[in-house]
Amino acid sequence: MDENKNLIPGNYDASQIEVLEGLEAVRKRPGMYIGTTGLDGVHHLVWEIVDNSIDEAMAGYADTIHIQIEEDNQIRVMDNGRGIPVDLQHKTGRPASETVFTVLHAGGKFGGGSYKVSGGLHGVGAAVVNALSTFLEYKIYKDGKIYFQRFERGIPMGDMEMIGDTDKTGTEVTFRPDEEIFKESIQYNFERLRDRVQELAYLNRDLQIDITDSRSDQEPKEASYRYSGGVKSYTDYLNENKDVLYAEPVYLEDEQDDIVVEVALQHTTGYHLNLLSFTNNIRTHEGGTHESGFKAALTRVINDYARKSDFLKENDENFLGEDVREGLTAIISIKHPDPQFEGQTKTKLGNSEARTIVDRLFSENFERFLMENPKIGKLIIEKAELASKARVAAKRAREVTRKKSGLEISNLPGKLADCSSKDPEISELFIVEGDSAGGSAKQGRSRLFQAILPIRGKILNVEKASLDRILANEEIRTLFTAMGTGFGEEFEADKARYHKLIIMTDADVDGAHIRTLLLTLFFRYMRPAIDAGFIYVAQPPLYQVRQGKTSVYLDSDEALEEYLKTIPASPKPAVQRYKGLGEMDADQLWETTMDPDTRRLTRVDVEDAKEADRVMTMLMGDKVPPRRQFIEENARYVENIDI
Ligand code: TSJ
């Protein structure tokens, strides 16, 4: 092709100057287009490109996508779709494909072709990726030919060229994020990209997506996904380690006015709702019309079915939504030509017709499913029935707890040694394992702002227990009453009587187990307290070394070994290993673990609590194989664990 026709240098016209100005704007304010210039921004570029291939697949023209991370963090995305149109456009005289990569917001709406449904909160287009890359090259396989063009920092290095023949069709784009823009790092996190690739494969049934990582400074990695069950397979995956009420997830699907809805659901024997909703492959964290339609329709159809099949008698009350959702895992995926995203984080679907179509899907298909599968219908209803009974019992128990949870000390549990301060900001509640450590803690504490609640043995495992049983547990009731916050959905963080809740357990496996149990409890029923940063773990030492008049506390075998190397051989150091907090006297406990000037506390974040919850689910769930595997892998650490 003719050199002089290049955008740069020479042959400027108004539209080409506009193009250059557009690219310059993107490089000047990258944050405006992709949010951040951290690693998230780098990953954003990848999804920006991959979304186009997903769109082609959703339109039914592609079924395979490859993503290759290559040397120097260049990345290649390929699909076997129709290939981006290459025809010359009247207005600009440029090939449509060049426009895609140089004009902001041109993607998908050129060359006459545009998609009904398009992925992406992203959707800022390939031109933004191009502008923020040191280089970008495309190869288009189309009509028996291969077309090629290269850009550097968004600027064409030549016209599109025909470089060969082919019998394939598809699009291949290779680019490298510009470290002048992404100053933190352009090192992709393979695992993060892989997890989203897997999610995309679940959300787009039968679409094959491969991802490989062949950067020479890392281990080679690869993953490949294709699910013929789509969101139904996703539900299976989410329930992999759980006990399910019926073997196969229920799958429902409908299409109307170019809106596609898919729902998969399966009840487990657990107590928690796990509901994931998506619109055009984007997770709708804040829910919206599709989710509320789902909840309303599920409740209505199950109640209707329970009446028709005489499970609910004339005078029985209807099940509430929370009853039919207890232990439910569900995925709602909707593909919509014109989604309206609302809410704080723009992850709430606003389209009212989404509610209508989900509602219809349930009225027609779920009702029929229950009629045709009465055994499953019975299991679902029996589960709802148990849930509703537990709900009524819990309400009664809660009323009792609430009456007892006034702020007057006279109403507080007897085992609690409260502090004298009434100022939550400075007040601390130590939850201490065992009566003897509890005794030392009560003696050693600063009574002004430190309260002590000893708990005995292992508290009830919250994973296996329903709400009414959790509340019936003495130890747990005491804890919630002492905190003054209520719990679960009625939790009120601003009622907290202490802004530090400190878990103080032994530095052994049993201590770790009790800590895991407590964190699981907080994760499930006091989540806002974790978010508010109220939960801490105390770090008691493992060793005390005395030599002459000096005494030093140490945390680990390694620290002990290191320390012993640094001190003189005589007089002979005396090493004491604390098996439990109970072995420390009141002064030692104060000095090592409770005194704000010398103690070490670790604040618990949601990730810590989530991990505890995950371990707990595995250890305590009814499924034996994952539990056995975990115990085998961690035999060294869990030899004493009592499960
Ligand atoms: F974003 C992008 F441009 F960089 C990009 C686009 C990157 C990658 C990896 C793939 C794609 C892409 C685009 N794959 N498939 C398509 N298809 C079209 O653009 C296309 C093809 C044909 C027609 C038509 O109406 O004939 C319409 C379109 C939108």
Image (spheres, grey):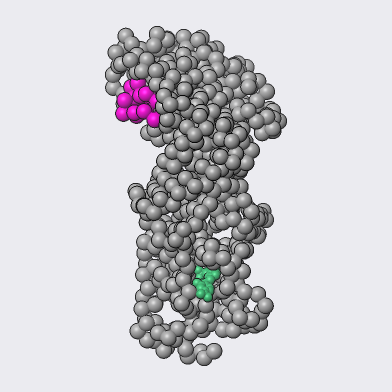
User: For residue 172, which quarter of the picture?
Assistant: bottom right
Residue 394, x across and y down, in percent: 43, 21
Quadrant of the frame with the N terminus: bottom right
Q: Is residue 401 above or below residue 49?
A: above
Given residues 307 and 79, the one toward you in this image is: 307
In the rendered structure, does residue 389 fall within the stretch colored magenta? no
Residue 140, x across and y down, in percent: 58, 76
Taking the spot 52% from the left edge, 18% from the top edge, the residue there is 459
Residue 69 shown left or right of residue 272 in the figure? right
Residue 59 in view in this figure: yes
Q: Is residue 478 above or below residue 311?
A: above
Taking the spot 36% from the left edge, 52% from the top edge, the residue there is 352
Residue 325, x across and y down, in percent: 48, 35
- The magenta span reads 484-501
Q: Is residue 436 above or below residue 632?
A: above
Given residues 545 and 120, the one toward you in this image is: 120
User: For residue 532, which quarter of the picture?
Assistant: top left
Quadrant of the frame with the C terminus: top right
Taking the spot 47% from the left edge, 20% from the top edge, the residue there is 468
Taking the spot 49% from the left edge, 19% from the top edge, the residue there is 469
Residue 533, x across and y down, in percent: 40, 33
Give the number of marks: 0
Q: Is residue 59 above or below residue 160?
A: above
Residue 360 shown left or right of residue 212 in the figure? left
User: For residue 267, which quarter of the picture?
Assistant: top right
In the rendered structure, does residue 499 fall within the stretch colored magenta? yes
Residue 559 in view in this figure: no
Residue 33 shown left or right of residue 95 in the figure? left
